[in-house]
Amino acid sequence: MQKNNYLVRLTFDKGFRNAVLSLAIKTIKLRYKNSLLGVFWSMLNPILFLIILIIVFSNFTSIDNYALYALSGLVFWNFLSSSILQVLTSFIDNSSILKSINLHPFSFPLSATLAALINLLLTLIPFFVIMFFLGYQLNFSLLFLIPMLIVTSVFILGFGMLLGTLNVFFRDIQLLWNTIIPAFFYFTPIAYTADMLPESSRGLLKLNPFYYFIESFHAIFHQSKIPQMDDFLMCCGLALVSFVLGYWVFRKYRKGFISNI
Amino acid sequence: MKSNNDIMIKMSQVDICFYIQENGFISFKDFLLNIGKYKFLQKKFVLRDINIEIKKGESIALLGKNGSGKSTLLRAMSGIIEPEKGKIEVNGIIAPLLGLGVGLEYEMSGIENIQLSCALMGLSKAETRKLMPEIIEFSELDEAIHWPVKRYSTGMMSRLAFSIAIMKQPEILLIDEVLSVGDIGFQQKCLRKVEEIKNNGATIVFVSHNFKEVQKMCTKGALVNNGSIEFYGDINEAGARYDQLFNN
């Protein structure tokens, strides 16, 4: 019985919450220490990609405001891919703490997710400035960003925890991730739109879990609409499945962490 | 129940295992092919059938060869490793000093590191604020406390780490060979601090290869060998048996 309440107990444990928050803040602080541009670094990569995409693709597409479409896709693609990597490596990054401080190991993926989310919120400030430049108009669909961010974070936490647990035992997981993720970039409608593809290959895109997240963010920022309900429900489903699976694998194999890190 | 109140740590029939992934990560392919056929993690017993009772105010030395499981025993007492079997009861605030400098971030200042380490050890912000002046004073780092830790010498780093670890006013102190830090002056200061904590009624479990240091501080010794506690009792006897291990 007690075991079932485990997650709940942790969430209400003040010391645990404080530790997770401190770890997340530390990660953010370290990222921007000794750098003049600070948070703008996170924007630099999408902007660079944006310029390339505009040069290469804007002549081929008929979508209006391609720049806004590409930018919103890029920002959230970066959020997804980089934060999953951070959660994935969180156990190994914190191996010394894991071995000698009595802190529940769940705090590492959790704080990595939190740090990624805080970082995204900081990035959104310059992002909005550029978006207004590109002709974005504030509207109510933006409110849907909040549930979307929550669902996406749960997905990141669960999926990262699943891969992260395996990564403790097989370090090739993180290498694999770094190899696969650029390929997935082209498998996700960021540089192009889904309806540019022939009908036959469009179904293939839907096998990609990132598709639903990116399409939902596109809806909010590019079409100024709330996401399509089946896309959003799919995001919720993916988040739930990945969290349950990730947490289950983590609980099952966490006893092997100390002897394998 | 009342009679148990002065027992601070009680381990009964505790087994502790390591889980080794023996195939090594070269054979990830093999792992995928053999899913379900073999156990993914192999169990390896590190400690078997450990029974020990440590009373309030006692100070115990853990003796044993390298790799005999002393540190694992301390980790189990502090709750970092869960036992495979058996029961570990701990009554009181426990401060494990298992690795000094763990969690120190080189890019952050001494002060920021104190805040972080305290949070990781489970202290609230208010408690940390209260302890802060004491920690800074004990570390004798003066204005260096505002420097980034990457500019510290090894000794300074250990001073900072030890000062953080020791200030929590623990009822149980677990020390794993961490007292040989800093210069002689600071080492003695650390030992005095441990002594002070002990005199305040705290329980201490001590791993050290410096038997003389241990002899001064501890009343009882436990000899860990071949995954079990071979002897638990008077410190001098434990020391003699420990020496015998190497004479044979």
Image (cartoon, coloured by chain):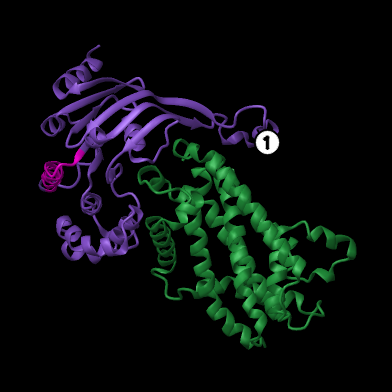
Chain colours: A green, B purple
Is residue A113 among the parts visible in the rendering?
yes
Q: Residues within 10 Å of mark 1 (few under 14, many from 20)?
A: few
State the image coordinates of residue B60 (x, y, percent, origin top left): 20, 31
Name which residue type carries label 1.
Answer: Leu
Chain letter of the residue carrying label 1: B
- The residue shown at (75%, 69%) is A229
Q: Viewer-proximal residue, B136 or A157?
A: A157
Residue B197 lies within the magenta run: yes
State the image coordinates of residue A35 (x, y, percent, origin top left): 42, 71
Horizontal side of A36 relative to B93 (left or right) equals: right
For the record, the magenta segment spans B186-203
Q: In this view, does A97 lie above or below A112?
A: above
Residue A159 lies within the magenta run: no
The quadrant where residue A188 appears: bottom right
Magenta stretch, overall SS: helix
Q: What element carries label 1?
A: helix
> Which quarter of the rendering shows the N terminus of chain B?
top left
Horizontal side of B148 relative to A221 (left or right) equals: left
Is residue A163 among the parts visible in the rendering?
no
- The residue shown at (33%, 32%) is B73
State the image coordinates of residue A113 (x, y, percent, origin top left): 52, 60
Residue occupied by mark 1: B32
The quadrant where residue B68 appears: top left
